[in-house]
Amino acid sequence: MARQPLFIGISIAILVILFFLKISAYTVSETEQVVVTQLGKPVRIVGGREKIAPKDTSIPWSPSPGLYFRIPFLQQLHYFDDRVLDYDSAPAPIITKDKKTLEMDNYAKWRIVDPLVFLMSVQNEQNAQARLDDIIYSKLREQLGLHTLTEIVAKARGKLMGEVTKTSNAVAQQYGIEIIDVRIKRADLPPENAKAVFGRMRAEREREARRYRSEGKEEALKIRAETDKLRSILLAEAYEKEQTIRGEGDAEATRIYAEAYQQDPQFFVFLRTLEAYKKSLRGKTTLLLPPQSEFLQFLTR
C-alpha cells in the first residue's frame, strides 16, 4: 500500500512532463516560416530561405524545417507561408496618356522574405494584401499614365509590367515582402466608352466594306466589258469564217451543178423539176397554173 502514492506521484509527474513537452514542442514544415515572440518581443526565427537573412541579425535564425521547442505560455508562435503567394486585385480605373480610361484588372506573385519585418509591419497576409493593393495600383497607375492606350495594349505591355514589378518591389521591401511579378489580367474600356469605340469600329468596317464592294463592282464591270469585247470578236470571226465556208460551199455547189448540167442538160432539168415538185406540192398545196406551163410539162405527158 505504501507504493501506491509513489506510483501515483510518478504518473502525475510523467503526465505533467508530457503535457509540457507537448505544448512546448512545435514543428515547422518546408512551406512555413515562424517568428517566436516572448511577451511580444521577437526572440527567434525558424524556417524560410537560407540565402535570405533577416535584417535584425541579433535574433537567432534557424532556416532548416523540423522539430523545435519553446517556453510554454511565455512564447507565442507566428506562422507565415514560405511559398509564392497570389495577389488578385479588383478592377480599377486607370487614365492613360491620351486621356483614355481603362478598367484594369491585374494580378501579382509575391512572397514573404523577412518574416520578422513582415510581422512588425503588416502582421498577417490579409493586411499584406491590402498594402499590396495600394502599392501595385499606385505604381501601375503611375506607369500606365505615361503611355497611350495603343502602347499599353499592343506594343509595350511586357516592358511596362517589368517596370511596375521593379518599382513595386522596391517599395514592398520595407514590409518584408518581395514582389516577383505583376501582370495585367484584363483591360477593358468603361461601358460608355466601349459603345463609342465599338460604334467607331463598326463605322470603319462598314466604310471598308463599301470600298471593297465598290472595287468589286469596278472590277466586275472591267471583266464584263472585256468578256463582251472578246465575245464580239469571237462572233465576228466565226461569222466571217461561216460566210467564207458558205461562199466556198455555194461556189462548189454551183460548179457541181454546172458540170452536171453540161453532162446531160435534159436530165438535169428533169431532176431539178422533180425537186421543185417535191418542195411545192408538199402537204395540201393548191397551184393555179395554165395547162401550157413549163412547170407542169412532166405531169401532163
Image (cartoon, grey):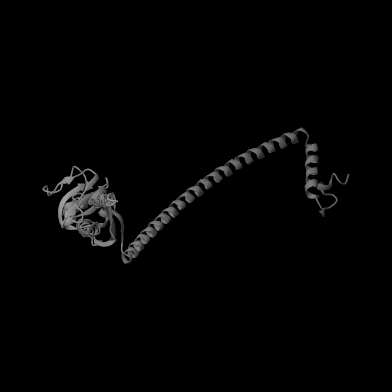
Q: Nearer the viewer, residue 295 or 29?
A: 29
Residue shown at 21%/48% (left/top)?
69
Left or right of residue 204: residue 160: left
Q: Nearer the viewer, residue 188 or 276?
A: 188
Q: Farthest residue toward the bottom?
A: 192
Total numbered circles: 0
Q: Farthest residue toward the front?
A: 1
Q: Farthest residue toward the left?
A: 58
Q: Position of residue 240 (x, y in %)?
A: 57, 42
Q: Nearer the viewer, residue 177 or 36?
A: 36
Q: Is residue 179 visible?
A: no
Residue shown at 56%/46% (left/top)?
235
Q: Position of residue 184 (x, y in %)?
A: 28, 54
Q: Quadrant of the C terminus?
A: top right
Left or right of residue 192: residue 251: right
Q: Position of residue 29 (x, y in %)?
A: 27, 46
Left or right of residue 278: residue 229: left
Q: Farthest residue toward the right?
A: 301
Q: Is residue 187 visible?
A: yes
Q: Position of residue 1 (x, y in %)?
A: 30, 51
Q: Nearer the viewer, residue 9 or 20?
A: 9
Residue shown at 80%/37% (left/top)?
267
